[in-house]
Amino acid sequence: MGSYNFKSSGKTVSKIRQEVQARTVIPVGIKTPLRQDEKNLFGMHYNVVDQVHDNLRNLLLTNWGERLGFYDFGANLRELTTEISSIDAFDEAAIGRIRDAVSRWMPFVNLKDFVSEIDNQNNLHTGIIRITITYSIPQLGIDSKALKISLYAI
């Protein structure tokens, strides 16, 4: 018969907890647009940076009155697409609305750059307005991240 020391046999409770915590990843939020996932009912974000990026995109694409209970939530950019007289006037109005919405609803996001372009390949009178916004989140250590959104002009 052999002699065994109990300290060298098996795993300790703290070691088991560490292994379980390493395997268990807690979701931060739901991905939009909604989609089904293998693990969860909906696709989930497991990274705070990805969730903030998704929330910023939703904020910019939401118009006033679309969010139940928060009438003034969003940047209300779609309204600008119907009144484009010049790209400079659009840019000035869009920058102001984006700045106001982000400062009110996501003040931890620092906006850096704004670039817009109109893509009217199919028709000269209507088109797609593509906006690229560069931003940073100092609290999360994100120096520069870009977000691209598309608005369809009427």
Image (tube, helix red, strand yellow):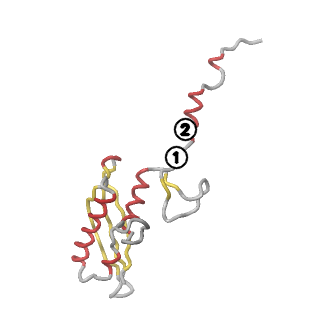
Q: Which residue is mark 1?
A: 26
Query: Between marks 1 and 2, how big is the CA–CA gap?
Result: 9 Å
Looking at the image, residue 46 lies above or below residue 81: above
Residue that appears at 56% across and 28% down: 14
Q: Which mark is residue 140?
A: none
| Residue 104: quarter of image | bottom left
* Residue 137: percent from left, percent from top: 32, 51
Asked if the residues shown at circle 1 and circle 2 are in contact, with their CB atoms under 8 angstroms apart, the answer is no
Name the secondary structure under disc 2: helix
Q: Which residue is mark 2?
A: 21
Name the secondary structure under disc 1: loop
Circle 1 Cα neighbour tier, 10 Å, few/some/many (<14 / 14–19 / ≥20): few
Label 2 is placed on what type of residue?
A: Gln
Looking at the image, residue 51 lies above or below residue 96: above
Label 1 is placed on what type of residue?
A: Ile
| Residue 122: quarter of image | bottom left
Q: Earlier in the sequence, mark 1 or mark 2?
A: 2
